[in-house]
Structures are given as C-alpha cells and as structure tokens.
C-alpha cells in the first residue's frame, strides 16, 4: 500500500536487503586483527619486502641452473615494480593500491588527479598554518553496556610524518572531520587508514576533489566482506561581504580547487536605488563529502570533508569549544546537531542522520540563492516598467542596462541549474539502486529534503525560461534604443551647426567689410563709419538671403542645366545644328558615333571571303 511523506509525495514500501552478516558482531583472529590495525601503506611495504625476500631465496637456489642463461631477467627487472612504488609518493602508491585493484577505480585518471593534486600542493607554509587545527577525531570503543574509551580533540598535521596526532588504531568507532581537505590532510589520512578502509577513502578523495554529486552503497561480496556508504553534495554559497575569499588549494594546472565569481549584476544600479561600493555579492563553490565504511555495526569509521574557505562558521576549533553549551560534545559531521557523547552505533542510522542534516544545510543555501534571484528579477522588471514609461533620457540607459542584465542573469541561472540538476540526478539514481539497503521510513526526511531541492530546481528553470522569452523583445528594444540614440546625436550635431551658422553670419560680413575698408583705392567712396555700417548690413543681408533661399536657387540651377542639355540634344539630332558652336558640335558628333555600333561584316563560309 502506498504511503505519503510529509510533502505529500506518494511512495512505496520496500523490503530492506541489508546483509545480516553486518548486524552481528564479527570475530577476528589474531592475524586479521593485526592486519586491520596496520596502516595500508605499511601493509604495502610489508608485501614488497616479503616479495623481495622470496625472490632473493629463489635466485640463490637456482643459481646453477640460470648461470648459463642469457635471456633470464635480472634481479633489477624482477624488483622493478617494488622499486617503482618505493620511488613514488605515499599518495600515489595509496591510490594505485595492490595488484588488480585498479579495475575498481571509478575513472582512469583517478590516480593521477589525486596524486598530482598532492604533489603540486607541497609548498612551504608559515608557522601559523603549521599549527592550524584541520581535523577533529572522535574515537570510541564499546564496552559492556555503555561507552568505554573515547577521544575527542582537535588534531594537527605533523608535516614531517604527515600523520594525524593522537590517532590510535584500536578504536572501534572512529569519526574524522576535516575542513578544506588539502594535500597535508590527504597525506595524513593515507598514512593512517586501515587496509579495509583504503578503497572507500580512494573514491572519497576523488569525488570530493572533482565535486562529483553521488549517493551510494557499496557491498563487497568477495573476500573479507565490508560495506561503504558515501554521500557527496556539491552546492553554491552566496555571500555579501567587502572582500572575496579565494580558495588557496590549487589543482595541478594552477587553478583554484574551488572557483568563485563576483556578481555585480545582482545589484543593478537605478536612480531610485543607491548602491554600495563596499559590499558585493560573491558566489562560491562548496562541497561536502561523507563516507562510512566498516566491517559490521561495531567496527566502522566515518570520514567527513567540508569546504569552509569562504568564511564559513564551521571550524575544527569551533566544534571543539561547543562542549557544555547544549549537551555533551558536538558531532562535527552532523553540524553539531548530534550529541557525540551519546553516539549512534548503527552505521546506517548515523549515515542517514548526517545526510539529512547536510542536505538541509545545502537546501538553505540553495533557497537563499534562488530567493535572491526571484527578488532581483521582480525588482528589475519594476524598474524597466518605470523606465519605459518615462521620457527622461536617463531612463533609456536603464533599459539598456536591463538588456545586459538579462543576458548575465540567464547565463547565471543556467550555471546554477546544471549544478542542482546533478544533485537531483544523484538522488534519483540512489532511489533506484541504493535505497533498498535502508528501512523505508528512515529515509523519509531525506526524501522530503530532496523534494524541496527539486522544487528549487523547477524555480530556477522557470526563471531562466522567463528571461529567455524576454531576449527577442529585449533585442528589439535594444535596437530601437540605438536608433533613438543615433537620432539624438544627429539633432545635437544640427544644433551645433546652427550655432556655427550664426557665428558665420555675424563675423564673416564684419571681417569682409573690414578688409574692404582697410584697402586703399578699392572703394569708390570715402570710407567712414556710416558707409562701413551700410556695407556690413548689406553683406549680412546678402548672406541671409543666400542661406534662406539656397535650396530654391540650387533647384533652379539644376532645372536650367537639364533644359540646356535637352536643347543641345535636340539641335544635334538635326533640327538646328547651325547654332551650336563648332567645338561643341564636334564633341557631340564623336560621342554619338561611339554610341552607335558599326554594322557587322558578312562572310561567305564556302568561299572564305567577304560578301559584297
């Protein structure tokens, strides 16, 4: 029978297929426990050492047999694989793993991407960065009816050994919280992670560095069985501040691991809306990755990587100082909303609770961004309405600004929609494949949160569609505005010409009259003030007459020239050629002959001569 979640979405019950092997406490023999407590890197080194010893013993026993062989590989060739791993970095050896494990990689570039990120990021750090708390460990062992040993303290990275301080291998339940995962943190985790947790941590590194949206469950059925629950949530964060925050972590190509964009078009300037030059909006990429892996409900570890470079309120020291405010110690993976002194020992229950909390935080960020976009679109449309209904020349510039803003906003909404669409697609894939490993009602809060994310995605698509529909009309308006601006420019030029004409009317007659009166013997009368005034006014009057009637005079001159040309053509055709001057008549006759083509010559094709 179908049920409904709080959002009213119909859903079906299902039967949980979680392997019962993990619900019972599994027994470890001495060798298994020793292997489990041995870091994976040290385990690899032990394998290579044993392989070298076995190959050395084999070489001594077969020395007589291969003494005369020429094509037998040398000891250097046999030890090439072991030596090559010893020459590589710990991160690269960890990502490569043991023989045959490369077939389980998500991507062929997985090894190079993670290893090159760590090798590129090995730069000198100052003393403050060396002592910065970057990880928080919560290690506990279950004993009897309650909690036995617990460890909860911020940890520093030992840059010499790249190990997490205060880390112990005998913990049954381990929580590792890391902010802004960098090369030093990866090196520390690589050198301490256990053998059975190595595959899960490889994929966790890769998906976190590549911002891949994913929710999944992996059950290992061959060999020693274990489980992995992983959750990767990329999202954006919108912040308004006086300065922007750049991610100091860099990829192998030198680009920041997480990008950010300044958004000046979110506050489009208008006459009625003052703008602040100090505050500005910035959009930051962010990523949260959580992985839970273990052997059963009593022995497992949880890793959480959270981006906080954009001045986030989350920090290792902040969680460590939250003790005693509301209850016991705050669980950092759950944003402090779980009492770490009353831990959840069921790994699936803990995983779903962390996913629910982290999805809710991402939903808050998405809601803030989309609500801001809706307000901006509404405000910009209101400003456009008043600008179109106004005759103020400045309002035309506001319309032009709106067209440019429309283009920026459309691209921005497309960028947001692509990221959110990947997250929703990851949830849909989890519903089809991994959700059956959990009880049906335990995922209702998460399903509700992702339902809200789908609603936010639909809002983004509606806003983008609405702005795209405005683009054709906006282009026409933009072209009309350009025509109006060209007309205004022409009118301005005409007014400048009018002013220049007035200046010419006043000063040109004055200068001409002054030149005439300054020349001796040119004027037929005696120069004096009265005659100078008369000549000046006469010249002004003549210029005014010319300027006022120049169009009609030009028209009369053109009309007269047309009549003269027609008259000469008629006389040339034979009516009265005697009145035409000889030179003119000669040129006309030559022109007429050139226009008439000579008759073609006829040939007799049989005789090959001209016809008479």
Image: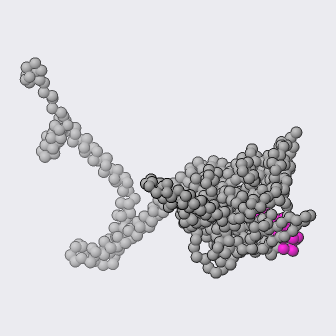
Does residue 402 appear in this view?
no
Q: Does the magenta run of residues contain 327? A: yes
Q: Does the magenta run of residues contain 205? A: no
Magenta span? 323-342
Q: Give the percent coordinates (x, y) of residue 433.
A: 74, 45
> Which quarter shows the N terminus?
top right
Picture quadrant where residue 497 is located: bottom left
Up/down of 484 relative to 600, above or below: below
Residue placed furthest toward the top: 606
Q: Mainly helix, strand or loop, the magenta region?
A: loop
Residue occupying the point 49% across, 54% down: 65
Residue occupying the point 30% across, 51% down: 557
Picture quadrant where residue 577 is located: top left
Which of the pair 443/503 is nearer the observer?
443
Q: Give the percent coordinates (x, y) of residue 200.
A: 70, 57
Which of the pair 456/269 is nearer the observer?
456
Residue occupying the point 80% across, 71% down: 151
Which of the pair 173/254 is nearer the observer?
173
């Amino acid at each position: 029978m179908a049920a409904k979640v709080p959002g009213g979405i119909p859903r079906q019950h299902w039967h949980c297929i979680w392997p019962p092997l993990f619900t019972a406490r599994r027994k470890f023999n001495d060798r298994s426990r020793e292997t489990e407590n041995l870091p994976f890197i040290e385990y690899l080194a032990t394998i290579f050492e044993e392989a070298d010893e076995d190959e050395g013993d084999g070489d001594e026993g077969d020395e007589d047999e291969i003494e005369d062989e020429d094509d037998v590989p040398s000891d250097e060739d046999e030890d090439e694989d072991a030596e090559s791993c010893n020459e590589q970095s710990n991160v690269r050896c960890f990502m490569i793993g043991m023989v045959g494990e490369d077939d389980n990689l998500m991507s062929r570039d997985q090894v190079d991407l993670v290893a090159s990120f760590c090798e590129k990021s090995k730069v000198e750090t100052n003393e403050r960065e060396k002592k910065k708390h970057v990880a928080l460990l919560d290690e506990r062992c279950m004993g009897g009816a309650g909690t036995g040993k617990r460890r909860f303290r911020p940890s520093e990275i030992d840059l010499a050994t790249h190990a997490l301080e205060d880390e112990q291998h005998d913990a049954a339940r381990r929580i590792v919280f890391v902010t802004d995962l960098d090369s030093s943190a990866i090196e520390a985790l690589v050198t301490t992670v256990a053998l059975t947790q190595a595959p899960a941590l490889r994929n966790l590194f890769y998906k976190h560095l590549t911002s891949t949206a994913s929710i999944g469950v992996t059950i290992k059925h061959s060999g020693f069985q274990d489980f992995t629950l992983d959750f990767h949530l990329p999202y954006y964060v919108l912040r308004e501040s006086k300065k922007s925050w750049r991610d100091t972590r860099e990829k192998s190509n030198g680009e920041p691991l997480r990008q950010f964009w300044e958004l000046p078009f979110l506050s489009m300037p208008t006459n009625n809306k003052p703008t602040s030059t100090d505050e500005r909006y910035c959009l930051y990429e962010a990523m949260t990755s959580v992985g839970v892996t273990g052997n059963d409900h009593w022995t497992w570890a949880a890793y959480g990587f959270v981006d906080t470079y954009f001045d986030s309120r989350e920090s290792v020291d902040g969680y460590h100082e939250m003790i005693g405010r509301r209850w016991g110690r705050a669980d950092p993976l759950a944003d402090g909303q779980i009492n770490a002194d009353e831990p959840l020992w069921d790994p699936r229950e803990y995983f779903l609770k962390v996913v629910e909390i982290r999805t809710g935080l991402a939903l808050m960020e998405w809601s803030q961004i989309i609500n801001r976009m809706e307000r901006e679109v509404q405000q910009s449309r209101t400003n456009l309405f008043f600008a179109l209904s106004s005759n103020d020349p400045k309002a035309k510039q506001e319309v032009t600004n709106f067209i440019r803003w429309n283009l920026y906003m459309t691209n921005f909404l497309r960028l947001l929609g692509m990221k959110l669409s990947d997250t929703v697609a990851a949830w849909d894939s989890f519903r089809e494949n991994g959700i059956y490993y959990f009880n049906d009602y335990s995922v209702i809060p998460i399903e509700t949160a992702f339902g809200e994310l789908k609603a936010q995605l639909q809002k983004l698509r509606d806003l983008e569609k609405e702005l795209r529909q405005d683009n054709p009309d906006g282009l026409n308006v933009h072209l009309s505005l350009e025509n109006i601006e060209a007309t205004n420019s022409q009118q301005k030029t005409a007014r400048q010409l009018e002013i220049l004409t007035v200046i010419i009317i006043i000063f040109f007659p004055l200068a001409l009259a002054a030149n005439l009166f300054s020349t001796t013997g040119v004027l037929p009368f005696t120069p004096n003030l009265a005659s100078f005034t008369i000549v000046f006014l006469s010249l002004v009057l003549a210029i005014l007459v010319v300027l006022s009637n120049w169009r009609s005079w030009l028209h009369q001159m053109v009309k007269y020239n047309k009549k003269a040309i027609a008259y000469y053509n008629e006389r040339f055709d034979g009516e009265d050629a005697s009145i035409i001057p000889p030179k003119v008549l000669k040129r006309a006759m030559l022109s007429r002959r050139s226009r008439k083509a000579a008759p073609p010559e006829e040939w007799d094709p049989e005789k090959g001569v001209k016809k008479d």
